[in-house]
Image: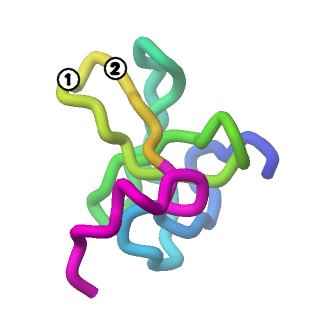
Amino acid sequence: MSTPDVGSNVKCGICGKETTIQFVTDREGGRAYDLTCMHRNAVCPTCGALAKDDSDSILEVKPLCRTCNPEAFEDEED
């Protein structure tokens, strides 16, 4: 995946919806992507897809990818 930028059409790493990047900010740990679906994503360092930002702080990003770390999503109800 190439590096997405503002206005790019992407698939949200949290809800899975096709959406658009509203703005991008540089944070400790990488870039944060705020999407029109109201989720903040980051790029997974393993597969390059957009992934959930699992950080506890707005100052950093910590990608948590559903594909690369499925065990972290086992407790979610579908």
Please provide percent x and percent y for residue 60.
34, 20
Q: Is residue 32 above or below residue 28?
A: below
Q: Tag 2, which secondary structure?
A: loop
- Residue located at (73% from left, 40% from top): 3
Residue 67 disc label: none
Q: Is residue 28 above or below residue 5?
A: above
Q: Which residue is mark 2?
A: 60
- Residue located at (42% from left, 12% from top): 28
Please provide percent x and percent y for residue 19.
49, 71
Q: Is residue 21 magenta?
A: no
Mark 1 in CB contact with mark 2 (< 8 angstroms): yes
Residue 15 image-quadrant placement = bottom left
Q: Tag 1, which secondary structure?
A: loop
Q: Gap between marks 1 and 2, in whole Å?
A: 6 Å
Residue 78 image-quadrant placement = bottom left
Q: Which residue is mark 1?
A: 57
**Which range of residues does the magenta coloring cover?**
65-78
- Determine whether, in the image, residue 23 is placed left or right of residue 60: right
- Residue located at (44% from left, 27% from top): 25
Of all residues, the one furthest to the right in this rendering is 2
**Total residue callouts:** 2
Of the pair 55 and 59, the residue shown nearer to us: 55
